[in-house]
Image (spheres, rainbow, N blue to C red):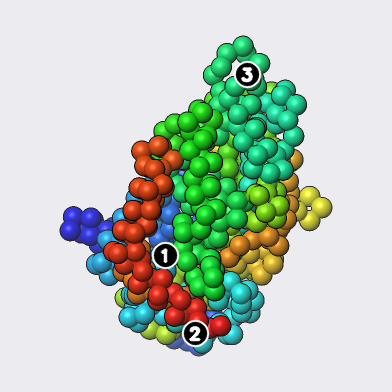
Amino acid sequence: MISALAMSMILSACSSGNDTAGGTNTPSTNGEGSSAPEAPTKISWVTPLHHAEVPDSRIEELIEEKLNVELDIQFIPAATWSDRMNAAMATGNLTDIVNISMTGANREAIRDDQFWEIEPYLDQFENLKKLKPEILDNTRIDGKLYALYQGRPFSRQGLIYRKDWADNLGLSAPANLDELYEMLKQFTENDPDGNGQQDTFGLADRGDLVSGAFNTVASWNGVPNEWGEQDGKLAPAFMFPEYRETMNFFRDLRENGYINADFPVTSKTDQQNLIINGRAGAYIGCMCDVQSLYTGASQLNPDAELDVHNRVVGPSGEFTVVSGPGFNHPYLFPKSAVQTEEELLKILAFMDGLMEPEIANLLFWGVEGEHYNVVDGYAVPISDQGKLDREVKPYNPLEVGEPATSGRLEGKFDYAPAQKAVELFDDNEPHVVQNPTLTLDSDTMTQHKERLAQIITDATYNYILGEMDEAGFDQAVERWKSEGGSRMIEEFNAAYDAIR
């Protein structure tokens, strides 16, 4: 109740306030018939903040000036984001634009007509109607469209590793899981930094099965993306034999000290610091992190070298990698804040304006000449990563679309591994494995997703930590089934059969 009250107080100031007459860019007429500038449209927006400080307001002010809006952007620390948004949802104190997941209770709220369906309006806006249909489809609920999106490559997953360590040991980028295991072993046992001490280890990981190393390694090993087809029916990924092989892979790493022993309770910041501080030599996750890892590592050790790599194959010999839905940060429009169609159209006009190339570049790259320069048609960010993190990065989640639809400049990085990472995102795309249940419905999933997922998460970690054997894992799977998992399988298969 206290959280809900606090959220109510914080967001009360950023409720719609959309009682300004006229459109975003349409002039109004004063009493004497002369044309006068229209008052800015008031728009409130809440967005997660992934950095330590609330950003400088300069970019926000430039957007207000260029699009004739008055913005009230609330930056909520990512660590408390879910709790704060749950409180806002519970009390109905939402901003005009919200960035929420479209699963669980939120999905039911969308179905309950608490958010605007936007598809009937998109053709009125030259930029919004360019958004990719295949990605918009991934946001649909019951075939209806409620969300705009920030585009993302389908897969940015891969390996970041200490190339100088690999060179010292005569190792190449691993082509398969056996070579990956060998690299992690060598980084632990053979003094890769040459200081004469056994003070390094192979893989830095964190307590996140989805975004940490486990999910990516599992996809290299042939595990389906959350769900897969087995004997013509959908089944959860943890029921596939390759999932257990992946658990054994990580169990061996931990037993031999090739991974940080406390990884199930390690934060992302602490995980990255293991690379930056020269303790660990490999990081499996988003290859986009190579720039910030290098920036930190090179400050402590100017001789540190990193590289990125994506194609690691499992026993099948075929390269596969887990895929996301192609978007991040879905943007929805709650009817509790946006109360009329007129208000909605003004906000959609603002979102359309965010897709203008000038504005899209401002949100993503910052101010030309200060935060980036244009070289041969590419945006080249400045080398001062701290300045970018303070002044530009917090605004990245406000982007609508992607370069192909907004005309935003593609990046070109002075740091070669960062540029290589961008190229490997494209290389991943033909090999991604999609989640077949992404747009399917299961009432059991909606109501009990987190509780049921926790059963398997706990069992997976306990198995890797050696606190559970295969029989114990089997018991956890049976518990998952008995507490709703079997119903979930039935519901997803019924929905799957209906569209085949």
Mark 1 vs 2, N-terminal side:
1
Q: Mark 3 near mark 2, Cβ–Cβ under 8 Å? A: no
What's the mark number on residue 101?
A: 1
Q: Are marks 1 and 3 in contact (CB under 8 Å)?
A: no
Evaluate if marks 1 and 2 touch, with contact meaning CB atoms under 8 Å apart.
no
Q: Distance of mark 1 from mark 2, alpha carbons?
A: 25 Å
Report the residue that reaches farthest toward the left. Answer: 1
Give the SS element for disc 3: loop
Residue type for callout 2: Ala
Residue, disc 2 = 498
Front disc: 3 or 2: 2
Instruction: Name which residue lies at 44% across and 40% down.
Output: 464
Q: Is residue 230 above or below residue 52?
A: below
Name the secondary structure under disc 1. Answer: loop
Quadrant placement of the C terminus: bottom right
Query: Relative to 415, does residue 403 appear above or below in the rendering?
Result: below
Q: Secondary structure at mark 2?
A: helix
Compare marks 1 and 3 and give the one earlier in the sequence.
1
Residue type at mark 3? Asp
Q: x, y (%) of residue 301? A: 63, 22
Q: Which mark is residue 191?
A: 3
View extreme (right): residue: 376
Relative placement, left or right, of 377 versus 281 is right
Q: Quadrant of the N terminus?
A: bottom left
What residue lies at 36% left-to-right and 80% top-to-bottom?
A: 111
Q: Which of 414 and 428 lies nearest the eye of the viewer?
A: 428
Please rate how many residues cluster around mark 3, counting C-alpha atoms within 10 Å: few if below 14, some from 14 to 19, many from 20: some
Three-letter amino acid code at the position of disc 1 = Ser
Measured Cα–Cα span from mark 3 to mark 2: 57 Å
